[in-house]
Amino acid sequence: MAPRAPRGLAPALLWGLSLFLGLPGPVWVQLSPPPKSSSPTEPHPCHTCRGLVDSFNKGLERTIRDNFGGGNTAWEEEKLSKYKDSETRLVEVLEGVCSKSDFECHRLLELSEELVESWWFHKQQEAPDLFQWLCSDSLKLCCPSGTFGPSCLPCPGGAERPCGGYGQCEGEGTRGGSGHCDCQAGYGGEACGQCGLGYFEAQRNASHLVCSACFGPCARCSGPEESNCLQCKKGWALHHLKCVDIDECGTERASCGADQFCVNTEGSYECRDCAKACLGCMGAGPGRCKKCSPGYQQVGSKCLDVDECEMAVCPGENEQCENTEGSYRCVCAEGYTQIEGVCVKEQIPESAGFFSEMTEDELVVLQQMFFGVIICALATLAAKGDLVFTAIFIGAVAAMTGYWLSERSDRVLEGFIKGR
């Protein structure tokens, strides 16, 4: 097979350089093998290799009905060999093996491309399983199912049924991991061959184990009933094969703060805050106080708020006392406001006159209106009550008033509303 340019920018540049200089062969870059331990965000090299092989097999399925595309398939296969085993098909499949963003796949393909070509042309018949030949035997990235670690040791419980079938063997199928069994809920032991805490053997034979849950507070039991307990969970005590709740509040097991009280719960306890009136307490409310907090006094069996305002506690002039829960505060009396720590009488602004905000132009108009009204009144008197002159007088007064109001209607209305 004629040598082909490798994939990747750096290998391709070195390939071109070797051809340009006339070197006898291409300059290859031997990539370092993937690290034995990968970061949590990167897939294990074995998983990357499995994904590469799966993608390769899908490519084979996709091209199973393809041909050389030259128009004379019979002649091409006679002269160039069969398409299904040809270099052309291999190149087409390899071009689609890795997605553009899968860096790990591309890195592994560059490392193993010669191996894949060797398998394609020489090893398919004797090793039809590419995953086994490439990932396990050649690159040594993977282990057979049921084994783990650099030496592919059997998982606990054996390679045939790792972790008894009730758990996951850490690192199974890879050259890494500890081989520790992560058991399913209800199962425990090195190979998940026992029932875990809070479960009992409901059924067991040579190959299977069924674990069922114990009664609530039982840590170990012989059956599902309340009276089948052999060991109790924390916070419970075994009494005649039954688990009885321990009242931690009645023992020294409870540990609550000085301003808290203990409340027993099933299998445990809670610490809750005392009432504000209490300085230490034995329960909820102001009636369970050990001592009263400052600002409270004992009245019967309860700690009640002291009304400090019954005493002369606000010495400032024009101050008055306002009682609060457990304390008091001094505020200014009605009609006074606090300025720089002193209660002073509030200043009520004097009411301005009706004409105080009038401009000079408005005053001239008002004077003209006044003289006009006087003239109309005199004219009406001279006419001795004639209705025509009276109507003219009223119309003139209305016209002048309307003109004046149109000039300052907003301020006149505001003055009336505020009582000015």
Image (cartoon, rainbow, N blue to C red):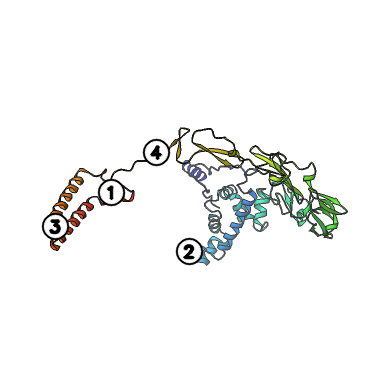
- Circle 4 residues within 10 Å: few <14, some 14–19, many ≥20: few
Return the residue found at the far front: 384
Compare marks 3 and 2 and give the one earlier in the sequence: 2
Query: Residues at badges 1 and 4 in contact (C-beta under 8 Å)?
Result: no
Q: Nearer the viewer, mark 1 or mark 3?
A: 3
Answer with the quarter of the image where residue 359 lies. top left
Three-letter code for the amino acid on which mark 3 is drawn: Thr
**Which numbered circle lies on residue 70?**
2
Q: Is residue 89 above or below residue 154?
A: below
Q: Disc 4 designates what residue?
A: 347
Query: Residues at badges 1 and 3 in contact (C-beta under 8 Å)?
Result: no
Q: Nearer the viewer, mark 3 or mark 2?
A: 3
- Circle 1 residues within 10 Å: few <14, some 14–19, many ≥20: some
Q: Disc 3 designates what residue?
A: 380
SS type, badge 3: helix
Q: Is residue 211 above or below residue 110?
A: below
Q: Rounded to the nearest whole Å, what is the CA distance between mark 2 and mark 4? A: 106 Å
SS type, badge 4: loop
**Which numbered circle lies on residue 411?**
1
Compare marks 2 and 4 and give the one earlier in the sequence: 2
Tell me, yes or no, if residue 288 can be seen here: yes
Three-letter code for the amino acid on which mark 4 is drawn: Gln
- Circle 2 residues within 10 Å: few <14, some 14–19, many ≥20: few
Compare marks 1 and 3 and give the one earlier in the sequence: 3
Three-letter code for the amino acid on which mark 1 is drawn: Arg
**Residue at x 59% of width, y 60% of height:** 58
Answer with the quarter of the image where residue 129 lies. bottom right
Three-letter code for the amino acid on which mark 2 is drawn: Gly
Q: Nearer the viewer, mark 2 or mark 4?
A: 4
Q: Rounded to the nearest whole Å, what is the CA distance between mark 3 and mark 2? A: 124 Å
- Is residue 126 shown left or right of residue 86? right
